[in-house]
Image (cartoon, rainbow, N blue to C red):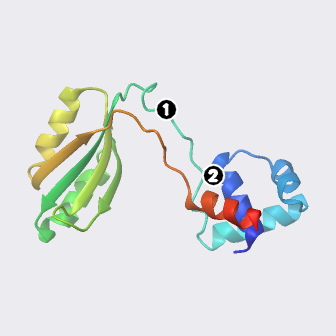
Amino acid sequence: MDHIDKKLLRLLQENARYSLKQLSERVYLSSPAVAARIDKLEREGVINGYHADANLDKMGYHITVFINVEMNPKQKPSFIDFVRETPNVLECNNVSGSYSMLVKAAFPSTVDLNRFIDQVQKYGATETHIVFSTPIPARGIIKIEADETEEK
């Protein structure tokens, strides 16, 4: 990956709906050259997909949480199946430390959250953190690297 690929990734993370023409103007390449680079990044698995960034609050999911789950390693496969089938789960990570799984989820109410926690506690102890605000939303690492590369 060179600095042009990194700049393309930064731009696509900023807005995946930029046209090839808009991208080509920003990286100073032809549209076919930009398309070829994007295709290559997709084939190599650098670009995993394109997603809509939905506003959970406007969709009625006013409560976002991170739940630490401590469990026996033998329970992980069935737990992963459970959270994979739960639409409220936004992300699930296998982590180090005193807890083994970290789940990010969103719910429309505390009643729904409580119901979910009751189900999760069948797998082990939990610790729940409710998100009050997100001063820095999810962002791609290439944004940082691309900015540093351009300054040199």
Q: Is residue 16 above or below residue 108?
A: below
Instruction: Relative to 126, say whether 48 is above or below.
Output: below
Instruction: Name the residue located 88 percent from the left edge and 52 percent from the top edge.
Output: 25
Q: Are marks 2 and 1 in contact (CB under 8 Å)?
A: no
Find disc 2 in the rendering and name its residue: 13
Classed neighbour count for the residue bearing mark 2: other residues with Cα under 10 Å, few (<14), some (14–19), many (≥20):
some
Query: In the depicted view, which residue is nearer to us: 112 or 82?
Result: 112
Quadrant occupied by the N terminus: bottom right
On the picture, is 36 further left or further right than 115? right
Residue 46: x %, y % from top left? 60, 68
Question: Picture quarter containing residue 115?
Answer: top left
Mark 2 or mark 1: whose residue is earlier in sequence: 2
Mark 1 highlights which residue? 55
Residue flagged by tag 1: what amino acid is it?
Asn
Image x and y of residue 103, in percent: 28, 51
Whether 137 is drawn above or below 115: the answer is below
Looking at the rendered structure, the secondary structure element under dot 1 is loop
Answer with the quarter of the image where residue 78 lies: bottom left
